[in-house]
Image (cartoon, rainbow, N blue to C red):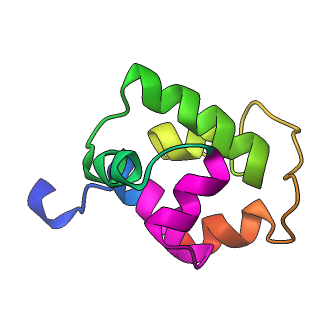
Amino acid sequence: MDELIPVITFGDRMRRLRLTLNLTQDEFAEQIGLSSATIGKYELLERPTRSAKHVAATIQLRYGVPRTWLLDGLPRQDSNLEPVGLSTQPEKILAEAS
């Protein structure tokens, strides 16, 4: 029965976020200060690494998307941070990514 439940990985959530923002890997990477190759590697990860946790915090500050969702798929729990320079609200991103 478990094989019927899709597993949504860290990389899947990161890719969904980027696509919801309508950004290429190059554009997303530039906005959060990484290389597009690094974004590609993160999008393939099943579990977040230590460095991915820092990236999730950066994404939270930049876009207002809760790092708990990005890292673990959990709803917003620990932040009242607002997105910087982006009109897209986290609720919309999370709804479209579900």
Q: Which of 46 and 29 is in front in this view?
A: 29
Can residue 1 be seen?
no
Residue situated furthest top in the rendering: 50
Can residue 12 be seen?
yes
- Magenta region, residue range: 14-32
Q: In this view, does 31 lie to the left or right of 47?
A: right
**Residue in the image at 34% along x and 53% along y:** 43
Which quarter shows the N terminus?
A: bottom left
Q: Nearer the viewer, residue 40 or 69?
A: 40
**Residue in the image at 55% along x and 35% along y:** 55
Q: Which of 60 and 76 is in front in this view?
A: 60
User: In which image quadrant can residue 4 be found?
Assistant: bottom left
Q: Residue 85, how many percent across, how many down?
A: 88, 60
Q: Residue 93, how many percent across, how many down?
A: 66, 68
Per the image, is 53 magenta? no
Q: Work out whether 58 lies above or below 53.
A: below
